[in-house]
Amino acid sequence: MNKKDKEKLILELLKHKCIEFGDFKLKSGIASPYYIDIRKLVSYPKLMDQVATLYWSLMKKLKFDKLAGVPYAALPIAAVISVKYNIPWVYTRKEKQSHGITKLVQGEYEKGDKVVVIDDIITTGMSKLMVIEPLKESCLKVKDIVLLVDRENGGKEIIEKKGYKLHTAYLMSEILKLLLNKRKIDKKMFDKCLKFMERTRKDTLSKLYN
């Protein structure tokens, strides 16, 4: 997907409120001036297809046997990529079931299979590590993580310090610059978001290195 198409996709995501600005509390507990909700894509099949194509453009040169979607936002994306490009996938349960086959990784796989993990965004990177752990416990190999948006809050550094490689379609700073240039946000909101990103990144990295 070329630069022009990637810019059009961001504007479509904004139009369908997959990107919003205001006051939001993130899963990590951090208060954010913007919110990215890719779960809404399930209601827009054509847009979901475009997002899957973008993911594939990042993944197709990687070496892997299976996909693994991070619950819950990335599961529909993994399903679409799987069907569209004929790639088998697995996913991890958030809790082990007490009946039937009690395993955390669902789907068929062989020990030693290489798995590429996909998710929508990265903030601190903790949710990625939580998914990777049961994959590794099931003797699956994880090296690469593919994302739609890096919020630039320090998660990339945490993930890469753990030895994983991050492949990202958009940096949040790039998205903000595009929306400012297209007059979809004003300079006040642009500056507010950048200050928030700088502050949270500093906080996250201080915990990493101290």
Image (cartoon, grey):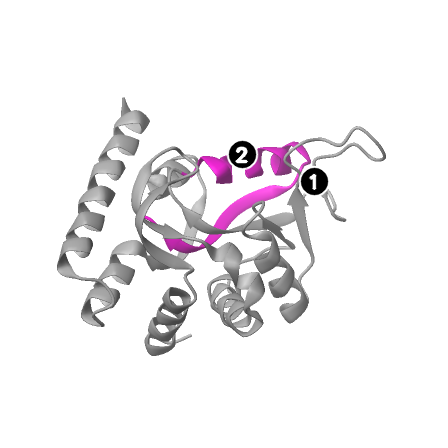
Q: Is label 1 in contact with label 2 (beta carbons under 8 Å)? A: no
Q: Amino acid at mark 1?
A: Val
Q: Residue at x 23, y 72 (%)?
A: 182
Seen at 37% across and 50% down, the residue is 35
Seen as rendered, the residue at the extreme top is: 210
**Mark 2 highlights which residue?**
130
Q: For residue 202: magenta?
A: no
Q: Nearer the viewer, residue 48 or 89?
A: 48
Disc 1 target residue? 105
How many other residues sit within 10 Å of disc 1, few (<14), some (14-19) or many (≥20)? many
Mark 1, secondary structure of its residue: strand
Question: Given the current orientation, which residue lies at the most extreme front position?
Answer: 22
Q: Amino acid at mark 2?
A: Met
Which secondary structure lies at badge 2?
helix
Can see residue 153?
no
Residue bounds of the magenta highlight: 125-152
In the image, is residue 130 part of the stretch drawn in magenta?
yes
Q: Position of residue 16 (x, y in %)?
A: 43, 66
Q: Is residue 95 visible?
A: yes
- Outermost right residue: 100
Name which of mark 1 and mark 2 comes first in the sequence.
1
- Which quadrant of the structure image shows residue 24? top left
Quarter of the picture containing the N terminus is bottom left
The percent coordinates of residue 202 (x first, y second) are 22, 35
Left or right of 98: which side holds 90?
A: left
> x and y percent of residue 57 in the render?
48, 68
**Label 2, residues with CA under 10 Å away: few <14, some 14-19, many ≥20:** few
Report the number of discs: 2
Q: Tell me residue 77's x, y (percent).
A: 57, 59
